[in-house]
Amino acid sequence: MPEKNPEVKISEDLLREYASVRDSWASQATEDNEFRNGVQWTKSQIDALRQRAQEPLVVNVIYPAVEQAKAMLTANSPRFQSTGRESSDVKTGQIFSDLMSWVWENSKGNTELKQAIDDYYVKGMGCFMVHHDPQADFGKGDVFVKAIDPLNVYIDPSSQDAYSRDASSIIVSKLYSEKQLISMYPDLEETILQATEVTVAPQTEAIRTGLESQIVSKEDIDAQRINSTSDRELELIDRYEKITVPHYRVFDPYLNDEKILEPGDFEEYAQKPAYKVFNQENERIITDDNEVARYEEIEKEFGNVFHLAINPMTQEQVMMQGEETPNALEGSTTILTRVTYADLIETGNILMNEIELTRIKQTVSVGGQLLFINVLPLEDYPIVTMMNGHNRNPYPISDVRLVKGLQSYINKIRSLIVAHASSSTNVKLLIPRGSMNKKQLEEEWARAGTAVIEFDPELGTPIVAGPIPLPNELYKNEADAKADIERILGIYALMQGDPSATPQTYKGTLAIDEYGQRRIKSKRDDIEECINQVAKIVVQYIQYTYTTMKVMRLLQPNHKPKEVKINEPVYDELSGEFLGKLNDVTVGKYDVLVVSGSTLPSNRYARFEYYMELYKSGIIDQIEVLKQTEVANVEDVMNRSSKMAALMNQVQSQGDRIKDLEGDLQTARRELVHARQRVEVEKFKTDLEQSANRADMASKLYAARSDDELKKIKNVVAEQEATNDEIIPLEE
């Protein structure tokens, strides 16, 4: 048998050591996971209960609490912000937040985050792995983030960091079928076929406790499939360790460019061409790629010595081979010397020093066979752990483990209550001994819950005693146990939507909801720091993977698409010369962080009321208020709202104009009435004056006629007095 590869032996020895130390934790984590899923009775406990005519009931308080915690911690997609570490990187640094969002969205990051948080609550530790697929995007490569099972992760026992950054090694070990491995590494099929089925680390099935499992695990499915297809099951060992790798730091003062190069890249860099340009005035060193290419063309056409002269026909400067001639421009002779970057480094024109950088070494083996060894372009482990109850070791305590005792107590109480209720409602059938076949009666007539009791009539009728009622304290204990679980987990009934726990007032509900989320926010810190570490690794992979032009489309929070271009080549419009890259993400140093609290929920009703108060106070505008709602395309809505408001203003102004015109019309009508009245009055006055004149004339005529008649009467009387002395004279 050939001797085993030393790297494979190291991987297997470390895996065996790490597995033996974490065996107890793995067993507990497995039990915690099954406990959350409702497997909460051991086989011996079930047998004992059924002997007492009790059923192993499960009132799973843990499951909804964990699901609610997951829902709250992943209520929103994480938002990222980025910045360049140097002032020259600030503009490009703003793009890295979009790139991180792209990687997160492309990886179905929210789904992976939910799985990691589930492991965090249930098993005590969630795990992320960042990797790049060079074949993705038609060979351009892509970066991905995925959650992996912490039970498959073996961490250096001496690690004390909650994110395992200080571990000397991290191993991922998992069983695969032979066909799976060949599909994963088709180029290594021959090596895989030579692998053995001997496993180093105990798998999940081997460390399960005495719980009677009622769930179907992935391991069970894999085992059934392997047995049914006779496919071999092989153990893949993926080991990561930190090593120091020599690098070269070079600084080009002519381009103000600093690079850190690996040995292979440095050798290629050192052979790059450059030029020393001598003339009467100065000596220049040319390292710009475009300028070097231009001088290569000049040297090819005119040699390494040339001068400038005046074209007598066009009076333009032209380049001529050789040294100056009589019609040449004085002092225009130029000498070109072709050199390499290595020459410039040797003369001190380009500064260089050798440094040691941390890199991640990946060693992958299967069944005692070495598959490959890679040196990843990373400073940190691509595996990031997120530990819950961290004890300064890689074996944290889950929230489920803290409440398992209370959950078991609730199950026992509920089982006892149901058994007591069933016993209390049983029908007791008393029959004289020998009066009929007891077995036949039980089979044909006895229903469920009916007890058949034989008695001897000669000894008297038996007294059937009823069950003793359960104390009320038992029901209180069950309620207290539920409350204790809620308090320990920090997920209260109100947060789960229990209407019975709702206060009488709306503001009281908001206050309790706010206070209840404070416990969740302590978990948020663990999760956000983990995502920050993931983002740090993603940035390193981005600069390694995304080296060509790439267009990415993102959906923004306002539901509008956004297009991001990176490494876009820029050319001179006139000459067509390559000038550089726009948004070159391969250079510079950048930091990407998740916006604190961006994944948490907020009471939208309370938030909306708060923003409405700010709007009424004139502090914010309508757009900011609408952003707090679920209205899509806020800008479009505001544009339509602005147009509608303008139209309404026009309608309002027209309405006001109509009202003004109506007022003017009414005024005109009133003035017309008044004018008519004045005309009628004047006419009446005229008629009245005419009537008065006529009356005056009539009065005068009547007076004249009266005077004439009076005179006639006087004359008659005078005549009668003259003839008759007895007539009494009339008084005037």
Image (cartoon, rainbow, N blue to C red):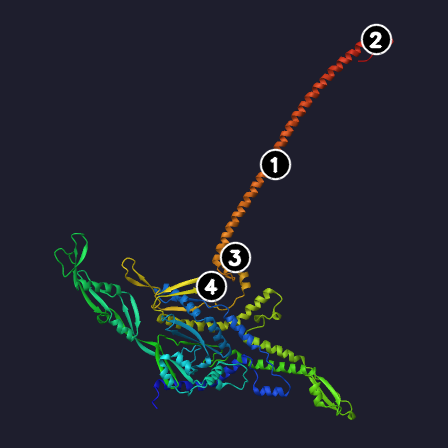
Dot 4 lies on which element?
Answer: loop
Q: Are marks 1 and 2 in contact (CB under 8 Å)?
A: no
Amino acid type indicated by mark 4 = Pro
Q: Rate crowding at label 2 as few (under 14), some (14 to 19) or many (20 or more) other CA atoms within 10 Å.
A: some
- Labels 3, 1: front one: 1
Q: Which residue is mark 2?
A: 720
Q: CA distance from mark 1 to mark 2?
A: 72 Å
In the depicted view, which residue is nearer to us: 390 or 381? 381
Between discs 3 and 1, the one toward the N terminus: 3
- Labels 2, 4: front one: 4
Amino acid type indicated by mark 1 = Arg
Q: CA distance from mark 2 to mark 4?
A: 133 Å
Outermost residue on the right side: it is 726
In this rendering, the count of numbered labels is: 4
Q: Which residue is mark 3?
A: 615
Q: Rate crowding at label 3 as few (under 14), some (14 to 19) or many (20 or more) other CA atoms within 10 Å.
A: some
Q: Indicate the position of residue 62 as horizontal and vertical percent values.
A: 56, 77
Between discs 1 and 4, the one toward the N terminus: 4
Quadrant position of residue 64: bottom right
Between discs 1 and 2, the one toward the N terminus: 1
Q: Which residue is mark 1?
A: 670
Q: CA distance from mark 3 to mark 1?
A: 47 Å
Q: CA distance from mark 3 to mark 4?
A: 21 Å
Q: Residue at x 60, y 71 (%)?
A: 498
Q: Which residue is mark 4?
A: 557
Dot 2 lies on which element?
Answer: helix
711 shown above or below 243: above
Q: Are marks 3 and 2 in contact (CB under 8 Å)?
A: no
In this orientation, does residue 693 appear?
Answer: yes
Q: Are marks 3 and 4 in contact (CB under 8 Å)?
A: no
Q: Indicate the position of residue 431 as horizontal and vertical percent values.
A: 75, 89
